[in-house]
Image: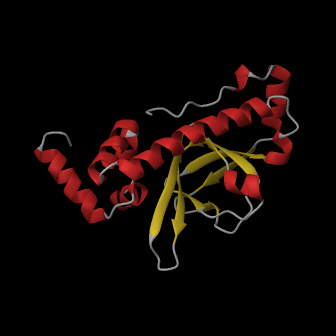
């Protein structure tokens, strides 16, 4: 998978419905290292990234950090676990770059005729991402995971610090450094 197709509101909303949709949007800017939400919060919103880069992170009790996902321009996301279970968020979402976001309260979106189609699109995109990552984590070597990351998200390699790429791939920064050296020696990095 090399794309994360954005949802086009024009597919399901006429001009009146689109205007209503945008009336629900609240703009938010985040500085780097600012959290959109913390683990334990109840984020009842859908987020659309207009500009910037965020990460969803899980921090264990011993301080180890794992990156669940990155979100960048035109991504739309919500906490599906919270939405479906009502339980608090299990991860935090933090800005890595200055971000400009549109926030939509889920209660508002549920009033729109276009919501079922939009929600289905969100589910389909997330399922594709999760299936791909799960298979790669289960069957791919650390080098294969990094090569997949480069193939699917080439622009992120320059935007994301090495230790966070490693945390996303489920490897140590030292392993990532060794993989990069090996690929460079092979003329692939």
Along the horizontal axis of the image, is 27 left or right of 165? right
- In this picture, is 161 found above or below 185? below
In this view, the residue in front, 79 or 20, is: 79
In this view, the residue in front, 55 or 29, is: 55
Residue 118 quadrant: top right
Instruction: Pinpoint residue 108: horizontal percent, then vertical percent.
Output: 85, 43
- In this picture, is 40 found above or below 107? below
Instruction: Pinpoint residue 155: horizontal percent, then vertical percent.
Output: 38, 40
Residue at point 52% right, 59% down? 32
Residue at point 74% right, 63% down? 87
Along the horizontal axis of the image, is 136 left or right of 18? left
Residue 77 quadrant: top right
Q: Quadrant of the C terminus?
A: top left
Instruction: Pinpoint residue 79: horizontal percent, then vertical percent.
Output: 67, 53
Residue at point 80% right, 46% down? 106
Q: Quadrant of the N terminus?
A: top left
Q: How is the image coloured?
A: secondary structure
In this view, the residue in front, 58 or 105, is: 58
Instruction: Pinpoint residue 143: horizontal percent, then vertical percent.
Output: 27, 50
Along the horizontal axis of the image, is 87 left or right of 91? right
């Amino acid at each position: 998978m090399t794309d994360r197709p954005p949802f086009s509101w024009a597919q399901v909303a006429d001009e009146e419905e689109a205007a209503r949709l945008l009336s629900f949007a609240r703009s938010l800017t985040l500085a780097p290292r600012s959290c959109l939400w913390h683990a334990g919060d109840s984020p009842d919103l859908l987020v659309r990234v207009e500009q910037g880069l965020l990460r969803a992170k899980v921090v264990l009790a011993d301080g180890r950090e794992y990156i669940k996902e990155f979100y960048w321009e035109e991504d739309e996301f919500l906490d599906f676990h919270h939405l479906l279970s009502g339980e608090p968020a299990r991860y935090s979402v933090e800005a890595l770059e200055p971000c400009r976001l549109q926030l939509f309260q889920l209660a508002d979106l549920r009033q729109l005729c276009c919501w079922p189609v939009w929600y289905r699109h969100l589910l389909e995109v997330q399922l594709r991402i999760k299936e791909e990552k799960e298979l790669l984590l289960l069957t791919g070597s650390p080098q294969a995971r990094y090569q997949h990351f480069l193939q699917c998200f080439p622009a992120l390699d320059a935007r994301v610090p090495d230790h966070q790429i490693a945390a996303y791939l489920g490897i140590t920064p030292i392993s990532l450094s060794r993989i990069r050296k090996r690929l460079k020696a092979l003329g692939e990095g």
